[in-house]
Amino acid sequence: MINEEKRIELRRKAMKLPLHPGVYIMHEKSGKIIYIGKAKALKNRVSQYFGSEKNHEEKVRQMVAHVDWFEYILTDSEFEALVLEASLIKQHTPKYNILLKDDKGYHYIKITNEDWPRISQAQQMLDDGARYLGPYVSSWATKESVDETLKIFCLPDCSRRFPQDIGKKRPCLNYYIKQCCAPCLGKITQTEYRKLVEEAVEFLQGGRHASVKKLEQQMMEASGKLQFERAARLRDRLQAIKRMADRQKVVANSVPEQDVIALAQGPSAACFQVFRFHDARLYDRESFPMGPVGEPENARREFVERYYSMRDSIPPKVTLDGAAESADLLERWLTEKAGHAVHILLPQKGEQAKLVEMVRSNAAEQVAQTTGRTGRETSALDELGRLLGMPNPPQYIESYDISNLAGEDNVAGMVVFENGRPLKSAYRKFKIKTVDGQDDYASMQEVLTRRFQEYEAHKGEKEGFGRLPDLILLDGGKGQVHAVCPVLKQFGLQIPLFGMVKDNNHRTRAITGDGGEIAINSHRAAFTLVSSIQDEVHRWAIGYHRQSRRKHTFSSSLTQIEGVGEKRAKSLLHHFRTVSAIREATLEELEGAPDMTHPAAAKVFAYFHENQE
């Protein structure tokens, strides 16, 4: 945490800055640059860093804690500030800016020099007598090309060596699904195998269209010479090439040239994923895992700047999964850098939206591998956070529900979901104390008031009631939300608060807040998560209500016994657990129970045994 005196000093200096566009540069004590940013109004932007820490993301708090001094450069416009910012970040690579490791080195396709040649991907050329194709820029595209070629030409991708391993083991699955010619079985001669490899290399060098034309010509010649077996093999190869092409095109059959960029965030990690399309075909894919990135809009702008600072090729369309800060300036910067018009798209529906969702799912899967969660959980939290307008996905969610029967046995349940999973150790039950009759709004007020009173008493414990949620979901509509809002204000808390609305069939339909309802049915991952939370809190609350009602019924039956009041009945139930256990207890056991006397125990014993007779 930044020293209070230092924070006040830096804020005082920031308040003297002009309301003018420019670039600000943060330095640590050694003088090293740790962050560079641009601003439309320097005073407003820089002074925010040294205000209250409550409104800062963790990444910003860490950066501010290391700031010793700052400088700034005035520009004539915000666009000039953006251009200068991109140039300075590339030059100084500050620690707290989004920095991308450019993995666009050279990659090769290797064809080994042996009796039974193998085709594989290689990261560098070695002096080993092998033949190398390339260099290629994209490692993903190189790997995809090798995998595709091996499947089309039925070449092995296993580690077996030939002819040493011929006949020693059973063939692998690829042989049975007709994706390997199985040299290990001895079903193909060395000459035939080498011919296949030569054709595969021609395919890699000439490309799909040239190979298709050549194979069609060879198939017609073989058919004309009545070589039907050879013609059938060539036909199968042509069909395999077509299937590969169709598999690629089905991803985006109407995308001429476009990059799709999506962000997924987790509790301690984030990932940007880029899919690049050309001629309706996915030709490259890049993943950029990183630590927490803070506010998504700013993160997207920084990422786009860094990414295209490293790329010579910029397509006419760049599709993002959400809003980016200064998108109009970013679009202008991309246009000037590319030398042609570049448009930033934010699709909401249709094929483009599905494309974005696919890329985001891949980014979520990368985050899941880092955080130990599933890609579905990561995607659900990320989607829910964006739907509710939260700066980050909610990692710790509390949900509440009220349960009663015509105002009797009023109780409430609280469940907790952490990282998209139920945290049962944090579940809590509340017996309503101040509300008589059926008043769910007042009951919800009481429950949340007691919850945050417990927070004040256990503040700093970072678990249980000592931990504040990132999001509160109430089982109900606007009424519950409006009832609880004053409670949050009373305790000075700014926690996102929403209600979960059900349809006539008691299924989750929408989320509601002060700004109206948010439909979630079309957002599958978020819908599934919210439905799970609503079902779980309802189960927990109604289970507690049934338990309380059972005890109340049992207690009422015991108070019919002379000498047994409400307090003594509850004490007996607490000690023996069930009415059956009380019935089967001996007189001595009843006398030994808390709050019992010999006459009262005798009355209880006589009551049950007389009834039995």
Image (cartoon, rainbow, N blue to C red):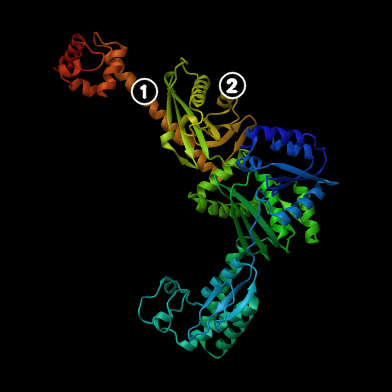
Q: Is residue 158 above or below residue 48?
A: below
Residue under the point 70% across and 53% down: 304
Which quadrant, please, contains the C terminus?
Answer: top left
Q: Is 408 left, or right, of 607 in this rendering?
A: right
Instruction: Name the residue type under label 1.
Output: Ser
Q: Position of residue 157 (x, y in %)?
A: 48, 74
Q: Is residue 26 above or below residue 513?
A: below
Instruction: Name the residue type under label 2.
Output: Gln
Q: Position of residue 414 (x, y in %)?
A: 46, 30
Q: In this rendering, does residue 547 appear at all?
A: yes
Badge 2 is on which residue? 490
Residue under the point 40% across and 80% down: 184
Badge 1 is on which residue? 548
Which quadrant, please, contains the N terminus?
Answer: top right
Numbered disc 1: secondary structure: helix
Extreme residue in the bottom direction: 225
Mark 2 or mark 1: whose residue is earlier in sequence:
2
Tell whether label 1 touches label 2 (CB within 8 Å): no
- Quadrant position of residue 580: top left
Mark whose residue sits in front, 2 or 1:
2
- Mark 2 crowdedness (10 Å alpha carbons): few <14, some 14-19, many ≥20: few
**Is 494 or 516 nearer to us in this picture?**
494
**Is 69 or 23 nearer to us in this picture?**
69
- Residue 294, labelled with which disc? none
